[in-house]
Image: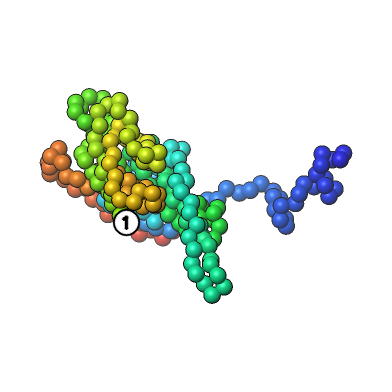
Amino acid sequence: GRDGGRGRDGRGRGRGRGGGRGPREEEVWVPVTKLGRLVKEGKIASIEEIFLFSLPVKEAEIIDYFLKDKLQDEVMKIMPVQKQSSAGQRTRFKAFVAVGDNNGHIGMGVKCSSEVANAIRGAITSAKLNVCPVRRGYWGRTAGLPHTVPMKVTGKCGSVSVRLIPAPRGTGLVSSPAGKKLMHMAGVKDCYSSSQGHTRTMGNYIMAIFFALRNTYMYLSPELWKEQPIPATPYQEHTDFLSKKQI
């Protein structure tokens, strides 16, 4: 047609009623937790401060604020799960999503929903809330930047247990494709891995790898034996700001 195949007096395909009038205003984040307010006001310098005090993160926007451009997300698996009801089965979709910045932060999220898109969206949010730091170390000589896991670590989920073993520089990631993806997102460059159990259950397998990577900071190695003075938590430091009423 003359109007470029638009149909119906050239107004496009009319996505819904009254959609797309005027410029879309950007969603402004209104924090609802104390931590969210501190982050939005720029009172917290880096995400490491949150990890140092083990503050629970309840808003995904906090992670976005610190790792906005660096975060990549990867849908690791989508599986249908069924529930038997009186009228047959009810199928929902379970999505496993990993997020990471290829530099020492990794998160893993799971969400079940009746639609794939909703499951993925929920899993991404859940993964951001679960972002944790990954400690990296050396296999031998401590030259250059840390490149592997600092010690042998194990993670377990269901029957699957995964063991990550430090590897010399240039080894690469010795693991399955899913394991490689996760370790690459966490910023580990060289690593051997060995797994036991039913690794075909992809959901449990990737969760086990995530738990193993998370355990790197739970191991007290001799270089961390020195006593560190504990500074005040951000909540205490900025009590005056937090006690002010929000307008």
Q: Which residue is mark 1?
A: 158
* Image quadrant in which the N terminus is located: top right
Percent position of residue 104, x then y: 33, 38
Percent position of residue 83, x then y: 48, 67
In depth, the one of 88 and 247 nearer the eye is: 88
Q: Residue at x 48, y 54 (%)?
A: 79
Q: Residue at x 76, y 49 (%)?
A: 13
Q: Residue at x 47, y 56 (%)?
A: 94
In depth, the one of 236 and 98 nearer the eye is: 98
Percent position of residue 185, x then y: 38, 38
In depth, the one of 44 and 146 nearer the eye is: 146
| Colour mode of the rendering | rainbow
Percent position of residue 17, x then y: 73, 57
Q: Is residue 133 above or below residue 189?
A: below
Dot 1 crowding, Cα within 10 Å, few <14, some 14–19, many 20+:
some
Query: Residue lying farthest right?
Result: 2
Q: Is residue 184 above or below residue 240?
A: above
Dividing the picture into quadrants, the one containing residue 235 is: bottom left
Viewer can see residue 29:
no
Q: Residue at x 44, y 51 (%)?
A: 96
